[in-house]
Image (cartoon, helix red, strand yellow):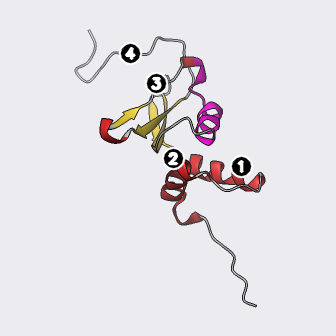
Amino acid sequence: MQGRGWMPSIVPGGDDQTVYLVKDDLGRLGAVWREADAEAADLETVITDLMAGEYKDPLRVIAFNTHERWSEDVSEDVAREIRRRFDLQLADVPSGLQDFVERHEGHHRQLALRLV
C-alpha cells in the first residue's frame, strides 16, 4: 500500500520526455490547455506552431516531465527564443503573437538608442 501523499501517474511509464503545453485564450470560450499530439509536444514543435500562428492568443507555455517529477513555466524562455528567431529573419513578430512575446520577455530586452 502506498503512503497517504502518493498519487498514481496518468502518464504511461517509460515516457521519459519533457512535454510542452500552451495555454491559449479562446475569447468567450475561455482559456484552455491546447491539445497536443504526444509526439508533437516537444519544445521545437511548440515554438514553430506559435510562430506559424497556430494559437489564437497564447498566454503561457508550461513544461513538465513526469518521470523526473517537475514542471515549470517556460513562457519567458519561449518568448525570447521567438523574438530571437524573428530578429534573425529581420522580421517583426506577428501581431497575434506580439502580446505573448512582450508580456513574457520581461525587462531583459533592451533597445539601444543612439543620440544624433
Nearer to me, 91 or 13: 91
Specify which label sits upstream in the sequence, 4 or 3: 4
Residue 44 as seen in the image, left or right of residue 74 = right
Is the residue under label 2 in contact with that under label 1 (CB below 8 Å)? no
To which quarter of the image does residue 42 belong?
A: top right
Disc nearest the viewer among 4 and 1: 1
Mark 4 packing: few (<14 Cα in 10 Å), some, or many (20+)? few
Disc nearest the viewer among 1 and 2: 1
16 within the magenta span: no
**Residue marked by disc 4:** 10
**Residue marked by disc 1:** 85
Residue 10 as seen in the image, left or right of residue 45 = left
Measure the alpha-carbon separation of dots 3 and 2.
Answer: 17 Å
Measure the alpha-carbon separation of dots 4 and 1.
Answer: 35 Å
**Residue marked by disc 3:** 35
Mark 2 packing: few (<14 Cα in 10 Å), some, or many (20+)? many
Highlighted range, magenta: 39-51
Residue 73 spot, x, y in % from top left: 46, 43
Specify which label sits upstream in the sequence, 1 or 2: 2
**Residue marked by disc 2:** 75
Point out the image quarter for the C terminus. bottom right
Disc nearest the viewer among 4 and 3: 3
Amino acid on which the number 1 mark rests in the picture:
Arg
Measure the alpha-carbon separation of dots 4 and 3.
Answer: 16 Å
Residue ID at (49%, 11%): 13
Specify which label sits upstream in the sequence, 3 or 1: 3
Vertical position of residue 78 compared to residue 67: above or below: below
Disc 1 element: helix
